[in-house]
Amino acid sequence: MTSTAPRVLVIDDEAQIRRFLDIGLRAEGYQVLLAATGEEGLGLAATQSPDVVILDIGLPDREGHEVLREIRGWSAVPVLMLSVRDAESEKVKALDAGANDYVTKPFGIQELMARLRVLLRQGARGGEPDAPVRYADERLSVDLARREVSLDGEPVPLTRKEFAVLSLLVRHPGRVVSQQQILREVWGATHVQDTHYLRIVMGKLRQKLGDDPAVPRWLKTEPGVGYRFPA
């Protein structure tokens, strides 16, 4: 393993999880830093400059949300939250606090690795949420600077709200964007509970893009939490 391998900081109080991640991450070529408490993790985050942090919500000395808030006070390092708590409210709380992604225990190592790769690509772009200004694949093209969307070479007319929602998701590729964040940024802080507005707009967006909600290609739903656009 070379010194240029990405450095992953794992903050989790379960020894079994730390061993599991240590073995799995090193097998994939990552450097690994391990911490069993929030304080230990904050110290390593501050002194060892990890490229990504895997942070458990339930820590013995303090809540993972508190550790996340401290990290966000001085660093934009990508953070993936882990928890046995699968309630939608927990996921939303973590994402709104600045987490880049959320995985519920137990989890598959390959899914975790895929999500880490997305976060590392985001970190390589400098952690800027608005770094991508254009998305294009063989069917869909979204040019944020020109405010143009086309499907199969044909322009797709979008309302102001539809484009704003799509733009927000495109600017966060691979990342779950919570319903509250979308509502706050597109409709305003007084509308963060008006999820029916968002459901209507998402329905119209999917219809215009021909994106099957049962098997979505671009507008993927994290049930009760938010939406994810492909990286």
Image (cartoon, grey):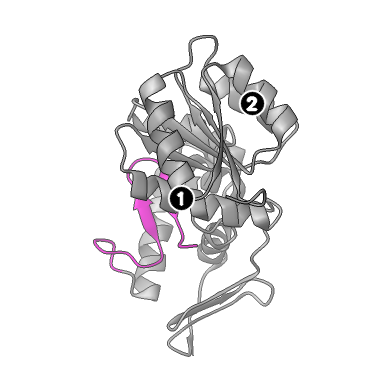
> Quick one: SS at disc 1?
loop
Residue 198: x, y in percent?
A: 44, 51
Question: 84 or 171, which lies in front?
Answer: 84
Residue 223 magenta: yes
Identify the element where label 2 is drawn.
Answer: helix
Left or right, residue 165 beside residue 45: left
Q: Which residues are magenta?
A: 212-231
- At x 51%, y 55%, the residue is 118
Where 155 sits versus 24, above or below? below
Three-letter amino acid code of the residue under disc 2: Arg
For label 2, the crowd category at 10 Å Cα-Cα, with few meaning under 14, some 14 to 19 and many 20 or more, is some
Residue 59 rendering spot, x and y as whole percentages: 48, 16
Instruction: Tell me what residue is drawn at x 38 percent, y 27 percent.
Output: 17
Name the N-terminal-most of marks 1 and 2.
Answer: 1
Q: Confirm whether residue 73 shows in the render.
A: no
The residue that disc 2 covers is 69
Is residue 211 rendered to the left or right of residue 168?
left
**Which amino acid, by three-letter code, is at mark 1?**
Glu
Spot occupied by residue 202 in the image (x, y as percentages of width and height): 40, 59
Q: Label 1: few (<14), some or many (≥20) within 10 Å? A: few
Q: Disc 1 and disc 2: Cα gap in Å?
A: 29 Å
The picture places residue 98, in percent across and down from the top left corner, at 59, 36
Residue situated in front as seen by the camera: 55 or 194:
55
Q: Looking at the image, which residue sits at the far top?
A: 61
Q: Is residue 202 above or below residue 97?
A: below
Image point (61%, 50%), residue name: 5
**Which residue in the structure is indicated by mark 1?**
28
Residue 197 drawn in magenta: no
